[in-house]
Image (cartoon, rainbow, N blue to C red):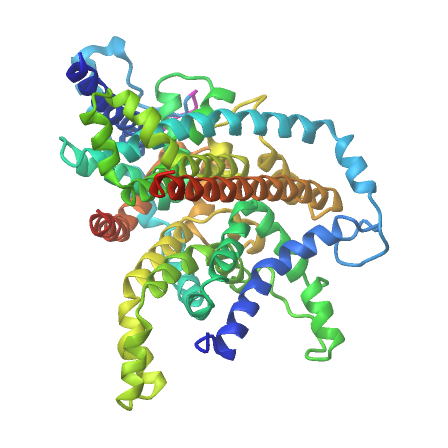
C-alpha cells in the first residue's frame, strides 16, 4: 500500500521502541553479575537463585496468584452478566445508573476506589485480609470484563439466539449452547484481563489488605522504595515471562478457534 | 415454565452485577462522604461519630448533629491541599497533551499500515499493557537516575557533559505518565482513524488541498471522538495517580493521590483523607460524565 509513507513507518517504529525499550533493559539487567542495575558486569543467574530463596517474596507471590485466580473468575461471571444486561435488556429501571457504575470504575483513580472500599469494610466491621482484597479486585476488574464482552455481544447476530428461543430452547439453554460458544473468546480475554489487573494492582490492594495478605506488588513496592536491586528485576522478569506465555497461548487458542469456526461455517454453507 | 425461567434468568443477569456494584462501588462513596464529616479521634476506627445499629433512629439523628465541616475548612486553610489539587490537574493536563502528541502519529501510522500487518501492530500496542504497571514505572528509575542508562548514553555520545537531573522533577512524572498511559491513547485513536475512508483525503488532494490542511480539515475532525476518549482515559486516572509521583517524583512533588496516601497511611487522619477524596471526586465528576456520555453514544451506534 502506497499510503504507508516513510513518516508513518518511522513514527510506528519509534513508538514501539519507546514502549518496549524500558522493559527490555529491565529484563537484560536482571541477568547482571553486579549489584548495580546500571553497569553491566557480565551474565549471571544468581539473582534468580536469590529470588527463590526469598521466602517473603515467595509467600507474597502465592497470595497474589490465589487472589488473581479467584477474583478473575468471579469478575468474569459478574462482568459477563453485566454485559448481557446492558446489551440484551435495553430498558429496565435504573439502567442509566447501572451503565454509569460500569464505566466509572474504568477511569476512577485507584486511591479513591481503594480508600472507599477500605472505609466500607471498616464500617461493616469486616476484618481486612485475603477476602477483602479479593472482593476489591472483583469490583474493579469486572467492569473491564463487561466492556470486552459487551463489544463482542454488540457485533453478534441476534437472529440465531432468537431462532433457538423460537425453537423452544429455554433462555438458559440458549445462552449456554448458542451465545456462550460465540462470545467465549471475548469472555476468555476478559478473564485474562481481569487476571493481569489483579496480579498488577498495588494501590487498591494496599488499602484493602490486612496482615497475612501481602501481595507481590505490595512487596515489590516496599523494596523498590529502598532502592533498585537486580533481585527485583528478576522478579519482574519472571512476571513478564508468565504474562507473555499466557498471552501467546491465548492468542494461539483464539486463532485456532477462529480458523475452526470459519471452516465450520464454510462447511455449513456448502450444504456439506 | 419457560416464561418463568426466562423471567428469573433475565432478572438474575441484571440484579446480581447491579447489586454488587451498588454495594461495593456506590455505597462506599457515601461512607467516604460521611466520614469526611466526622472528627478525628484516637480510637479504632480513628474517627467520631461512629454509627451503630444499637443507637436506633434517635441516636442516629443525635450523631448527625455532630457532623462538622471542619475537615473541609482545614483543606481550604492549608495551601498544601489547594496546591496539590492544582498541580495534579496541571501535571495530568500536560501529560495528556504530550501523550496525544506522541500517540497520534503512532495511531495514524498504524491505521495506514497494510491491512495484514494491523492485527500484529495492535497486539504490540496492547502487550505492554499486560505487564505490570508497577514494573513499567520501576523500569524507568534505572533509566532516569543521574548515573542511569539515559545519562550514560547521552554522555557517551557527547550530547551533554553533565548528567541531567530528571528523576525527582516533574519531567520524570511526565515521562512516567506518558509511558504508562500511551496505549490508552493509541487504542481509541487507532479505532477512530482506522474506520476513516481514505478516499476523502484523496478527493481533497485531487481538488488541490495541500496534505497538511487536508489533515486539519478532514482527518483530525473525523478522529475527534477518538481524541476525546483517549484524553479522558489518560487525564482522569492521571489526576489521582500515586505510583508514578511516588517513585519517579521527588519529595517536593505535589500530587493529590500522594497527599491522600500520606494523609491516610502516615498521618492516619481518616476524616481528612476522606475529605480529600470527596473533593477529588467532585473535580473529576465533570470529565467522568463527559467520558460516560461518549461511551454511551458509542454503545448506541454499535447497536
Which residue corresponds to the image point at 55% horizontal and 56% vertical from the top-left? B249
Query: Which residue occupies the foreground of this view, B178 or B78?
Result: B178
Taking the view exactly as shown, the residue that stands out farthest to the front is A272
Image coordinates of residue A264 in percent, x first then y, are 41, 39
**Residues rendered magenta in the picture:** B39-44
Q: Is residue A225 left or right of residue A137?
A: right
Which residue corresponds to the image point at 30% horizontal and 42% vertical from the top-left? A103
Which residue corresponds to the image point at 50% horizontal and 78% vertical from the top-left? A7
Image vertical order of residue B93 relative to residue A214, above or below: below
Image coordinates of residue A272 in percent, x first then y, are 38, 38
Does the magenta run of residues contain A126?
Answer: no
Taking the view exactly as shown, the residue that stands out farthest to the bottom is B208
Query: Which residue occupies the foreground of this view, A39 or B242?
Result: A39
Residue B24: tell me if it is visible: no
Taking the view exactly as shown, the residue that stands out farthest to the top is B54
Total numbered labels: 0
Q: Is residue A82 left or right of residue B64?
A: right
Query: Which residue occupies the foreground of this view, B83 or A142?
Result: A142
Q: Is residue B17 left or right of residue B190?
A: left
Q: Quadrant of the N terminus of chain B?
A: top left
Query: Which residue occupies the foreground of this view, B19 or A248?
Result: A248
Image vertical order of residue A132 relative to residue A216, above or below: above
Image coordinates of residue B83 in percent, x first then y, are 39, 56
Which residue corresponds to the image point at 27% horizontal and 71% vertical from the top-left? B221
Image coordinates of residue A12 in percent, x first then y, are 52, 68
For the stretch drawn in magenta, the main secondary structure is loop
Residue A139: tell me if it is visible: yes
Amino acid at each position: 500500500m502506497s499510503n504507508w509513507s516513510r513518516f508513518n513507518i518511522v513514527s510506528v517504529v519509534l513508538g514501539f521502541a519507546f514502549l518496549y525499550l524500558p522493559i527490555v533493559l529491565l529484563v537484560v539487567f536482571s541477568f547482571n553479575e553486579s549489584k548495580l542495575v546500571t553497569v553491566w558486569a557480565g551474565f549471571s543467574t544468581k539473582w534468580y537463585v536469590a529470588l527463590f530463596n526469598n521466602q517473603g517474596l515467595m509467600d507474597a507471590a502465592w497470595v497474589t496468584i490465589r487472589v488473581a485466580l479467584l477474583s478473575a473468575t468471579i469478575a468474569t461471571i459478574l462482568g459477563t452478566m453485566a454485559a448481557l444486561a446492558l446489551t440484551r435488556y435495553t430498558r429496565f429501571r435504573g439502567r442509566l445508573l447501572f451503565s454509569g457504575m460500569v464505566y466509572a470504575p474504568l477511569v476512577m483513580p485507584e486511591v479513591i476506589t481503594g480508600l472507599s472500599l477500605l472505609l466500607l469494610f471498616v464500617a461493616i466491621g469486616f476484618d481486612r485480609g485475603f477476602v477483602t482484597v479479593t472482593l476489591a479486585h472483583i469490583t474493579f476488574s469486572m467492569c473491564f470484563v463487561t466492556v470486552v464482552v459487551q463489544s463482542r455481544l454488540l457485533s453478534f447476530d441476534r437472529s440465531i439466539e432468537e431462532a433457538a428461543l423460537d425453537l423452544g430452547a429455554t433462555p438458559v439453554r440458549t445462552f449456554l449452547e448458542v451465545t456462550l460458544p460465540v462470545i467465549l473468546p471475548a469472555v476468555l480475554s476478559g478473564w485474562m484481563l481481569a487476571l493481569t489487573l489483579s496480579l498488577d494492582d498495588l494501590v487498591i490492594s494496599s488499602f484493602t489488605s490486612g496482615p497475612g495478605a501481602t501481595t507481590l506488588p505490595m512487596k515489590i513496592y516496599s523494596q523498590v522504595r529502598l532502592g533498585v536491586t537486580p533481585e527485583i528485576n528478576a522478579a519482574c522478569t519472571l512476571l513478564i515471562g508468565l504474562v507473555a506465555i499466557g498471552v501467546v497461548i491465548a492468542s494461539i487458542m483464539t486463532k485456532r478457534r477462529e480458523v475452526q469456526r470459519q471452516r465450520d461455517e464454510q462447511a455449513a454453507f456448502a450444504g456439506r | 415454565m419457560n416464561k418463568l425461567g426466562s423471567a428469573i434468568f433475565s432478572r438474575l443477569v441484571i440484579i446480581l452485577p447491579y447489586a454488587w456494584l451498588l454495594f461495593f462501588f456506590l455505597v462506599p462513596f457515601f461512607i467516604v462522604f460521611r466520614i469526611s464529616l466526622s472528627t478525628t479521634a484516637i480510637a479504632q476506627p480513628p474517627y467520631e461519630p461512629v454509627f451503630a445499629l444499637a443507637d436506633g433512629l434517635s441516636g442516629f439523628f443525635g450523631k448527625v448533629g455532630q457532623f462538622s465541616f471542619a475537615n473541609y475548612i482545614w483543606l481550604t486553610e492549608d495551601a498544601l491541599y489547594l496546591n496539590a489539587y492544582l498541580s495534579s490537574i496541571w501535571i495530568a493536563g500536560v501529560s495528556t497533551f504530550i501523550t496525544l502528541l506522541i500517540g497520534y502519529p503512532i495511531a495514524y501510522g498504524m491505521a495506514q499500515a497494510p491491512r495484514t500487518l494491523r492485527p500484529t501492530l495492535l497486539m504490540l500496542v496492547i502487550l505492554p499493557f499486560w505487564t505490570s504497571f508497577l514494573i513499567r514505572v520501576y523500569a524507568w528509575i534505572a533509566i532516569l537516575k543521574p548515573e542511569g542508562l539515559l545519562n550514560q548514553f547521552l554522555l557517551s555520545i557527547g550530547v551533554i557533559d553533565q548528567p541531567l537531573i530528571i528523576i525527582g522533577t516533574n519531567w520524570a512524572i511526565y515521562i512516567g505518565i506518558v509511558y504508562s498511559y500511551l496505549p490508552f491513547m493509541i487504542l481509541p485513536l487507532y479505532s477512530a482513524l482506522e474506520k476513516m475512508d481514505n478516499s476523502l483525503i484523496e478527493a481533497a488532494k485531487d481538488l488541490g488541498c495541500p496534505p497538511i490542511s487536508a489533515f486539519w480539515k478532514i482527518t483530525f475532525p473525523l478522529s475527534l471522538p477518538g481524541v476525546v476518549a483517549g484524553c479522558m482515559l489518560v487525564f482522569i486516572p492521571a489526576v489521582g495517580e500515586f505510583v508514578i509521583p511516588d517513585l519517579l517524583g521527588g519529595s517536593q512533588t505535589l500530587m493529590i493521590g500522594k497527599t491522600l496516601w500520606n494523609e491516610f497511611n502516615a498521618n492516619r487522619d481518616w476524616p481528612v483523607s476522606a475529605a480529600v477524596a470527596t473533593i477529588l471526586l467532585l473535580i473529576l465528576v465533570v470529565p467522568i460524565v463527559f467520558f460516560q456520555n461518549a461511551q454511551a453514544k458509542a454503545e448506541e451506534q454499535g447497536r
